[in-house]
């Protein structure tokens, strides 16, 4: 059967609707995705904030890092959902239907992006209640939102690749720990200048630091330097690699 672009788009929309319906039924997972970053932000602001010397208001400093960390929790849920579909035989059932197989993956990504946008909006709202005062212009907000959405899409495809690679719900949950741990070794919570010499080079050159610094510069007006282009290159590269890997793993899974 010949699949036209319009038909492929319809399949992607249908699979996206399916994944979104499943997400709304898993309220416990959605609440964890939202509450964990919020609790982490409140912990750093009210418990550790008084001991932090970052040269500016610590609430404003830490919020961009928490926003990025929030998207990481969403990627973890995506990996688990993909692995669950494989284990439950859902992928095999879809293979017997006249649909574009990769639309299943697109559906998971769309659901992840939607859930992450909601959770990120809630985190920003709570941050404003705790004293977060961005001085971004409308253009800066739009740019920051676009940059953040690109990050969410990229990290969601990473979650898809992890779910396809490990193929086990338990393993998917454990494998995403590295994705969630990396922001803690970046400039998310403290400036990299104050890190030990053994950690500083890694923190300065890993992907999360330029991504966080770009969002921080857009929202707070700090010096962006070359972080914007570096972060954009990281995101485009991460998206391209994870997309290719996901498609190849999916093709291998459905052979």
Image (cartoon, rainbow, N blue to C red):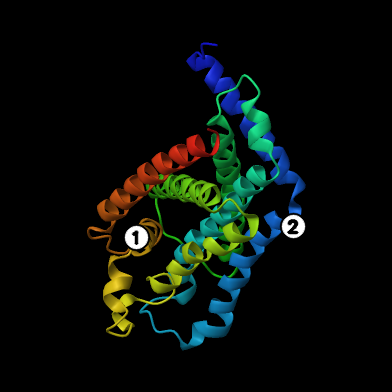
> Can you say which quadrant of the picture contains the N terminus?
top right
- Residue lying at the far left in this picture: please name it: 226
Which residue position holds label 2? 28
Q: Earlier in the sequence, mark 2 or mark 1?
A: 2
Q: Is residue 121 visible?
A: no
Q: Residue at x 53, y 47 (%)?
A: 164
Say whether residue 82 is left or right of residue 201.
Answer: right
Relative to 199, does residue 230 appear above or below in the rendering?
above
Give the CA distance from mark 2 to mark 1: 30 Å
Q: Secondary structure at mark 1?
A: loop
- Horizontal and vertical percent position of residue 131: 54, 70
What is the quadrant of residue 217 in the picture? bottom left
Q: Which mark is residue 207?
A: 1
Residue at the location (50% across, 62% down)? 69
Q: How many marks?
A: 2
What kind of element bears circle 2? helix
């Amino acid at each position: 059967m010949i699949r036209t672009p319009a038909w492929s788009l319809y399949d992607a929309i249908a699979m996206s609707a399916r994944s979104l319906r499943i997400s709304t039924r898993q309220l416990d997972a959605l609440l964890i995705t939202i509450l964990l970053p919020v609790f982490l932000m409140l912990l750093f602001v009210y418990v550790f904030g008084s001991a932090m010397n970052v040269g500016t208001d610590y609430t404003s400093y830490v919020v961009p890092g928490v926003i990025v960390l929030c998207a990481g929790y969403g990627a973890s849920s995506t990996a688990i959902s993909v692995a669950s579909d494989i284990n439950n035989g859902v992928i095999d059932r879809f293979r017997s239907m006249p649909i574009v197989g990769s639309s299943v993956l697109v559906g998971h990504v769309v659901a992840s992006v939607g859930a992450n946008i909601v959770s990120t909006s809630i985190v920003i709202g709570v941050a404003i209640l705790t004293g977060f005062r961005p001085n971004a212009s409308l253009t800066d907000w739009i740019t920051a939102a676009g940059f953040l959405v690109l990050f969410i899409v990229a990290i969601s495809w990473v979650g898809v690749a992890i779910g396809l690679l490990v193929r086990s719900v338990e393993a998917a949950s454990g494998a995403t720990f590295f994705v969630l741990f990396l922001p803690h070794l970046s400039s998310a919570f403290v400036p990299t200048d104050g890190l030990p010499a053994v950690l500083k080079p890694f923190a300065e050159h890993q992907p999360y630091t330029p991504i966080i610094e770009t969002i921080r510069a857009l929202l707070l007006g700090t010096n962006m330097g070359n972080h914007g282009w570096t972060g954009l290159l990281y995101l485009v590269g991460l998206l391209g690699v994870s997309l290719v890997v996901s498609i190849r793993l999916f093709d291998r899974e459905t052979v």
